[in-house]
Amino acid sequence: MTAATWLLLIGALLILMALTGTLLKALPISAAALYLVIGFAIGPGGFGVLDLELRQNDKLIEHISEAAVLVSLFAVGLRLQIRTQLSSWVLPALLASVGMVITVVLMTAAGVALQWSLPGALLLAAILAPTDPVLASDVQVRHENDADELRFGLTAEGGLNDGAAFPLVLLALGLLHTGFLDASGWRWLGIDVAWAVIGALALGWTSGAVFTRLTLFLQTRKHQALGMESFLALGLIALTYGVALHGLVYGFIAVFVAGLSMRNVERQAVAEAEGAKGARSGHGADSVVTAQAETANAMTREVLGFAKEMEKFVELVAMLVIGCLLRPEMFTVRNLILAVLLLAVARPVAVYLTTWGSRWSPSQRRLGAWFGIRGVGSIYYLAYASAHGAAESDLDATIGVVLVTVTLSVLLHGVSATPLMRLYRATRQRDGHG
């Protein structure tokens, strides 16, 4: 394809991306589903304009999906108004850990029953384990003050388990003899589980807080770094992720928590300003604290706005890549069975067991059981496994299952998200929950 044709295609896609917010309101399809269909049309399964094959382009696909996940996780962290009550975080943490493990166990058993080896079935289950934090925007929190427990739980779950799936992927790769797991397994438990998760939480919280406080100081006291919030956001993502890679901790978790930490600094600044006004301890102190609060609020909104724009762009690129990787021959009976088992059996069982006795209502549990959206995170882990030593014999069947599952999830969840969540909101408002 000539350079001129590429420019026409890219320009048309970017204009389409800008218009989807209005165009899709009248159509029963999500933006992600539309991009996926376009990707399939321009790929080998359609007109053959772009030829992508996962094993031959695994490094490229790994980096594209990695960037998409990082931007999405940071944006999700910024969307979530930090909640000081530990009880608010218990259920999302359980869904991202216990619920994910239950899903992996069930899908591993299904894989073994369909003639996969145990390590191969575990790798498939681990790749499919994380839910996607961005592909169905109607399921996410609508704004930072959204108090709905279902939307908060699903959004926080997607933010946490994109990184929490990493130990299980490494375990599967280790069992496939790719050098990730030593004979005793102690390194996996100590480094890949304990240190990598705890270190990521600490790194993300620290980097987000230090970065935001330093930026507030420069803007309010030194009048520097004004109007550069977009570059600062990219810098924070890159810096946090780079330190995480060097420190052998999970960068996905660290970047998500950095977004949470940035939002928390804004909350603290606003609380300090309200406290200073109440105390009336001096006009000078009041003005500085108030200025910091106003600057923090403006900065986080500017960064969030930029992150949302970047999120739309990486969604477009990621879904085009997934569509190009898809082949009609992948829709075999076995692949469809495994995809349906994940979406209609493993996910609901995991959610119902994890939320047993929780504050979620029956309708919230039903919706939570359905909206286990699979997307870019699974593609990242698939490319990661290919690029880091998984044999072709172990990946041949896995590639088809993952792509079929993601495709079904994008189409089914994309079509159902808007009407189901609209009905849910109407029911909640009628019952007086807002």
Image (cartoon, grey):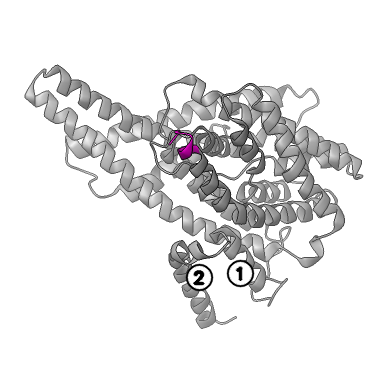
Query: Residue 430 colored magenta?
Result: yes
* Quadrant position of the C terminus in the picture: top left
Name the residue type under label 2. Leu
* Quadrant position of the N terminus in the picture: bottom right
Q: Residues within 10 Å of mark 1 (few under 14, many from 20)?
A: some
Quarter occupied by residue 280: top left
Quarter occupied by residue 317: bottom right
Image location of residue 291, percent across then percent down:
17, 34
Seen at 47% across and 57% down, the residue is 312
CB within 8 Å, label 1 to label 2:
yes
Name the residue type under label 1. Ile
Q: Badge 1 is on which residue?
A: 38
Seen at 63% across and 21% down, the residue is 357
Mark 1 residue element: helix
Q: Which residues are magenta?
A: 428-434
Q: Residues within 10 Å of mark 2 (few under 14, many from 20)?
A: some
From where the camera sits, is residue 243 visible? no
Image location of residue 255, percent across then percent down:
48, 38
Mark 2 residue element: helix
Seen at 42% across and 40% down, the residue is 79
Seen from this angle, which residue lies furthest front? 430
Query: Residue 162 colored magenta?
Result: no
Q: Report the front residue among 108 and 88.
A: 88
> Residue 13: which disc?
2
Instruction: Determine the CA span between mark 1 and mark 2.
Output: 9 Å
Q: Earlier in the sequence, mark 1 or mark 2?
A: 2
Seen at 62% across and 58% down, the residue is 60
Is residue 377 positioned above or below 268 on the image? below
Image location of residue 5, percent across then percent down:
54, 81
